[in-house]
């Protein structure tokens, strides 16, 4: 059987180690990975699915908001991902968004974001990068979804947490499929086909676990 071709977007410059990891995860999950750095109309290859990875914050102008918190933004990547999400919409391609990718998916379809997280939600979270690397939090699954199928039969799952912004209003045509122990949207999925799935955590950093490998495999099967 021909492997589905999966385009994936990381930062246009840098992110070499992340790209190597994502490339390997897609291959091990049954796909043929292609890192995307250019606009759709300049790419000759046909894709069967799209994955948007983590990275810098999305500029608030993308969801009609002003800057509330100073941050590092990447307008070029915002534009690149927006063009690819439009391409995926026009060609009915399944999409998976990871962390920033979930946020971009939600923004593209008309949702918006919290620019800061509720202090009550993060009061026990670590501050330094080493602490964050090993930090895990429980999320609760809310109904049927590809994520629920991947971690079944469990109704909650422990995940990493590297984000500082989060979904505020879920986009029309989507619903929240997981929430945090103290609230907050942790995953979304489209109401209708083709599949558009977003997770706020980083499953690529948890691929030593069977459920996270199953999540990638199941998504790539949707792309065949």
Image (cartoon, grey):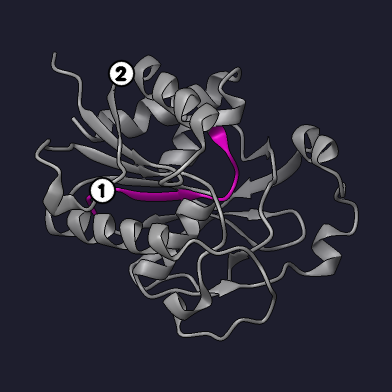
Q: For residue 208, which quarter of the picture?
A: top right
Residue ranking furthest to the front = 13
> For the image shown, how many numbered marks are present on the structure?
2
Task: Judge by depth and name the residue closer to the eye, 181 or 105.
Answer: 105
What x and y, as percent, mark residue 81? 34, 56
Q: In this orientation, does residue 105 appear?
A: no
Residue 147, placed above or below residue 102: above
What x and y, as percent, mark residue 169? 52, 75
Location of mark 2 (residue): 30
Magenta span covers which residues?
193-203
Residue 150 horizontal side relative to residue 7, left or right: right
Residue 91, placed above or below residue 2: below
What x and y, as percent, mark residue 209? 60, 20
Q: Quadrant of the C terminus?
A: top left
Residue 163 horizontal side relative to residue 125, left or right: left
* Residue at (44, 74) in percent of width and height: 111
Residue 141 horizontal side relative to residue 5, left or right: right
Location of mark 1 (residue): 38
Residue 130 horizontal side relative to residue 165, left or right: right
Q: For residue 9, which quarter of the picture?
A: top left
Q: Residues within 10 Å of mark 2 (few under 14, many from 20)?
A: many
* Residue at (34, 39) in percent of width and height: 8
């Amino acid at each position: 059987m021909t492997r589905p071709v999966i385009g994936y977007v990381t930062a246009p410059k840098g992110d070499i180690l992340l790209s190597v990891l994502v490339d390997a995860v897609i291959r091990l999950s049954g796909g043929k990975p292609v890192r995307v750095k250019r606009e759709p109309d300049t790419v000759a290859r046909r894709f069967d699915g799209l994955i948007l990875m983590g990275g810098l914050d999305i500029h608030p102008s993308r969801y009609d908001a002003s800057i509330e918190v100073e941050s590092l933004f990447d307008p070029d990547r915002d534009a690149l991902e927006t063009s690819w999400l439009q391409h995926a919409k026009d060609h009915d391609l399944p999409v998976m968004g990871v962390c920033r990718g979930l946020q971009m998916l939600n923004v593209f379809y008309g949702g918006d974001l919290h620019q800061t997280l509720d202090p009550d939600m993060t009061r026990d979270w670590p501050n330094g990068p080493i602490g964050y690397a090993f930090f895990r939090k429980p999320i609760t699954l809310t109904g049927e979804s590809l994520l629920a199928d991947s971690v079944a039969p469990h109704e909650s799952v422990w995940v990493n947490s590297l984000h500082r912004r989060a979904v505020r209003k879920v986009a029309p045509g989507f619903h929240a499929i997981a929430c945090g122990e103290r609230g907050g949207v942790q995953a979304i999925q489209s109401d209708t086909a083709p599949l558009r799935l977003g997770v706020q955590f980083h499953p690529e950093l948890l691929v030593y676990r069977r459920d996270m490998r199953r999540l990638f495999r199941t998504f790539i099967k949707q792309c065949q």
